[in-house]
Amino acid sequence: MKLRTERLILRPWTSADAEVLFRWAKDPQVGPIAGWPAHRSIEDSKAMIADQYSKPEVYAVCLCGEEAHPIGCLSLKFGEDTDLSDAADECEISAWLAPPYWGQGLIPEGCDALLGHGFEDLGMKAIWAGYYDGNFKSVACLMRIGFREHHIEKNIYLPLLGELRCGHVVVMTRADWEERQ
């Protein structure tokens, strides 16, 4: 399935995207702020596509007309893939974007499309998101698109990085979404 916005196409990841993913995922500004280590090889990127990005509702973020070159990722996570909710009608949204594209409003635009899909097509009642202390870009994006603060979780262990962090959890309900429309 593909989702389209004015400037973006959200499409499934393929194994052919590994080289482009590595280009962005090796940047230490990308993964560590989101809780995963910078990729050290194309093999790391291939593994991420096979293990995480081949799941339903995980999308490569591409500029319109440049579908072969993902610049980020947007996803809805369900069940065991999220620790923010175990309800069948709730999920978690997550995102990252390559640094050259920061500050252009692309992730809020893509999130709006994915939120609409989650609430309207998938019947979600709430969509959760989280960010770690210091991730100011995620805070700005989430608040801009209408999420509201819910709670803080201290001492979250990130096994991929081997460290503890403070996490902030935000939520948008279906009613919040409908009010924005």
Image (cartoon, rainbow, N blue to C red):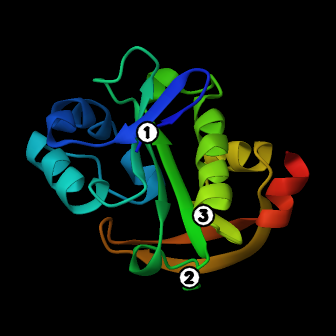
Q: What residue does disc 1 label?
A: 2
In the rendered image, is residue 133 in sight?
Answer: no
Disc 2 residue type (three-letter): Ala
Write down the quadrant of residue 69 in the picture. top left
Q: What residue does disc 3 label?
A: 130
In the rendered image, is residue 6 in sight?
Answer: yes
Residue sitting nearer the eye, 91 or 147: 91
Which image quarter holds the C terminus?
Answer: top right
Residue sitting nearer the eye, 95 or 24: 95
Q: Position of residue 170 (x, y in %)?
A: 71, 65
Decide which of tag 1 and tag 2 comes sooner along the chain. Answer: 1
For image coordinates 54% across by 85% down, the residue present is 86
Q: Report the disc number at residue 160.
A: none
Decide which of tag 3 and tag 1 comes sooner along the chain. Answer: 1
Q: Find the distance from the CA under tag 3 to the CA under tag 1.
A: 24 Å
Q: Is 78 rendered above or below residue 42?
A: below
Q: Is residue 42 left or right of residue 57?
A: left
> Which SS class for mark 2?
loop
Q: Position of residue 175 (x, y in %)?
A: 85, 64
Q: Position of residue 75 (x, y in %)?
A: 47, 54
Write down the quadrant of residue 57 in the picture. bottom left
For image coordinates 35% across by 58% down, the residue present is 36
Disc 1 residue type (three-letter): Lys
Q: Position of residue 55 (x, y in %)?
A: 31, 61
Q: What residue does disc 2 label?
A: 88
For image coordinates 73% across by 66% down, the residue present is 171
